[in-house]
């Protein structure tokens, strides 16, 4: 019984594992794993057609070709045409490869914009081993001997010179401190490929790393996760500077205020000062009939649609207030709200405000609210004064 070539089996397994742990895009890895199904234990030649790969992956032809090119350009496969003279067909021949590296262990971490990971440059000198063809003692052939622990970029230790290419990294203790700081920082950012981010982190000068650590909490406070760049992009572009420069000064920042508070009420009235928008929803068949009649029937439909759609921000404020959610109010509007006066819902003043509200077809306040805040004075004059105050604060003549 012939013993299996354990080195070849290990090499094929190492290649598949290396693909899984690489920084390649998920679809690129899927295409490579599918190719692996067609290869022998050594990762040797296979000749699947594009149609075969389409059928096995469920991807379309264009996607297959794109990710084969990505895999080849990043050094994970070698592609050549296979065919014989006189035959009408030719197919691509695929052989498993690793991104190469030189014999000294220095790796150039070249960022791949297509998601291929940090790809070392091809080695000018390859490690070779003479092994018998077919596992016997006959003629020999030269094959590459590439081991996963030496060539897999994701497994490169952070103590290698290339992995710690940042300025001022002179000894093992410094590298450990930088790696520790990166681990803590990346846990807070938690977005993007960790290997790309680590390379960018070590490539930064020490002062930039310190600045990043200091400024990141403020960036996290003012941005949503869905709005943040991948960690490596954030670090390379020093994006915290641009983001924080766009944030208004503390005195200019809008703050959250409770529902039905003075500031909330001022925000509501400010929104109502704008002209109502046209309803985005077309009239129903019944409403069209009523509009066609004209007169009171048409006015009633217009009023209903104005109440429902005329001031969407106010409608949203009311809905959120029912769930005890407030609204963000800019400081200048908070200042104007200081002159607002509370009135009980059963008071005569509140009744006059309700009348003005109905006359303008403004969305009504919930009846269950016991105390309501309004601008000081009689409703008509109070609204005029409020508009004038808005114009002064905004420095223009258009209060809306």
Image (spheres, rainbow, N blue to C red):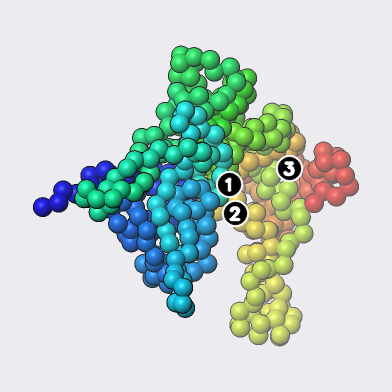
Which of the numbered marks, if any, corresponds to residue 194?
none
Within 10 Å of the Cα at label 1, are there few (<14), some (14-19), or many (20+) other Cα atoms?
A: few
> In the rendered picture of this protein, how many numbered marks are placed on residues?
3
Which of label 2 and label 3 is nearer to you? 2
| Residue shown at 87% from the left, 40% from the top | 395
Q: CA distance from mark 1 to mark 2?
A: 42 Å
Question: Residue at (72%, 53%) from the top-left corner?
Answer: 272
Residue 238 position in % (x across, y down): 64, 32
Outermost residue, front side: 139
Label placed on residue 375? 3
Q: Rounded to the nearest whole Å, what is the CA distance between mark 1 and mark 3?
A: 57 Å
Q: Nearer the viewer, residue 164 or 357?
A: 164
Q: Quadrant of residue 203?
A: top right
Closer to the camera, 147 or 323? 147
Using the rendered image of the protein, determine whether residue 33 is visible from the camera's viewpoint.
yes
The quadrant holding residue 228 is: top right
What is the secondary structure assignment of the residue under circle 2?
helix
- CA neighbours of label 3 inside 10 A, class few (<14), some (14 to 19), many (20+): many
Residue 393 image point, x, y percent: 82, 38
Q: Is residue 208 above or below residue 25?
A: above
Q: Nearer the viewer, residue 113 or 262?
A: 113
Q: Please report the residue visible at 10 percent of the width from the left and 52 percent of the height from the top.
A: 1
Q: Residue furthest left?
A: 1
Please, which residue is most extreme toward the right here? 397
Q: Are marks 1 and 3 in contact (CB under 8 Å)?
A: no
The x and y percentages for residue 287 are 64, 80
Q: Going by the image, does 360 lie left or right of 182? A: right
Of label 1 and label 3, which has the lower sequence position? 1
Side (left or right) of 171 relative to 249:
left
Give residue 113's mark: 1
Dot label at residue 316: 2
Nearer mark to the viewer, of 1 and 2? 1
């Amino acid at each position: 019984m012939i013993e299996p070539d354990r080195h070849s089996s290990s090499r094929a397994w190492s290649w598949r594992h290396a693909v899984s742990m690489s920084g390649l895009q998920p679809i690129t890895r899927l295409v490579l794993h599918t190719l692996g199904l067609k290869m022998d234990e050594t990762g040797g030649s296979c000749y699947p057609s594009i149609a075969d790969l389409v059928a096995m992956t469920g991807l379309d032809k264009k996607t297959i070709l794109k990710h084969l090119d990505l895999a080849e350009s990043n050094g994970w496969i070698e592609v050549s045409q296979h065919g014989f003279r006189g035959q009408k067909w030719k197919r691509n021949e695929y052989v498993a490869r690793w991104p190469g590296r030189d014999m000294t262990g220095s790796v150039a971490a070249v960022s791949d914009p297509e998601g291929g990971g940090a790809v070392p440059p091809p080695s000018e000198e390859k490690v070779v081993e003479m092994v018998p063809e077919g596992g016997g003692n006959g003629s020999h052939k030269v094959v590459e001997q590439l081991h996963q622990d030496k060539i897999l970029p994701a497994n490169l230790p952070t103590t290698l010179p290339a992995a710690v290419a940042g300025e001022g990294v002179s000894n093992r203790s410094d590298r450990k401190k930088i790696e520790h700081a990166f681990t803590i920082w990346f846990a807070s950012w938690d977005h993007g490929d960790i290997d790309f981010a680590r390379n960018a982190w070590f490539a930064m000068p020490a002062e930039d790393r310190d600045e990043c650590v200091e400024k990141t909490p403020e960036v996290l406070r003012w941005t949503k996760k869905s709005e943040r760049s991948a960690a490596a992009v954030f670090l390379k572009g020093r994006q915290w500077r641009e983001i924080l420069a766009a944030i208004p000064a503390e005195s200019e920042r809008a703050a959250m205020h409770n529902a039905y508070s003075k500031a909330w009420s001022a925000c509501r009235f400010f929104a109502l000062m704008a002209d109502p928008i046209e309803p985005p929803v077309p009239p129903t068949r019944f409403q069209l009939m009523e509009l066609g009649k004209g007169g009171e029937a048409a006015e009633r439909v217009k009023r209903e649609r104005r109440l429902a759609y005329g001031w969407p921000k106010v409608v949203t404020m009311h809905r959120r207030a029912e769930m005890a959610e407030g609204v963000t109010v800019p400081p200048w509007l908070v200042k104007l709200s200081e002159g607002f006066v509370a009135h009980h819902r059963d008071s005569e003043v509140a009744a006059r405000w309700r009348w003005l509200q109905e006359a303008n077809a403004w969305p009504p306040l919930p009846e269950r609210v016991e105390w309501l805040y309004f601008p000081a004075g009689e409703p008509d004059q109070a609204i005029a004064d409020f508009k004038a105050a808005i114009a002064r604060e905004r420095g223009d003549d258009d209060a809306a």
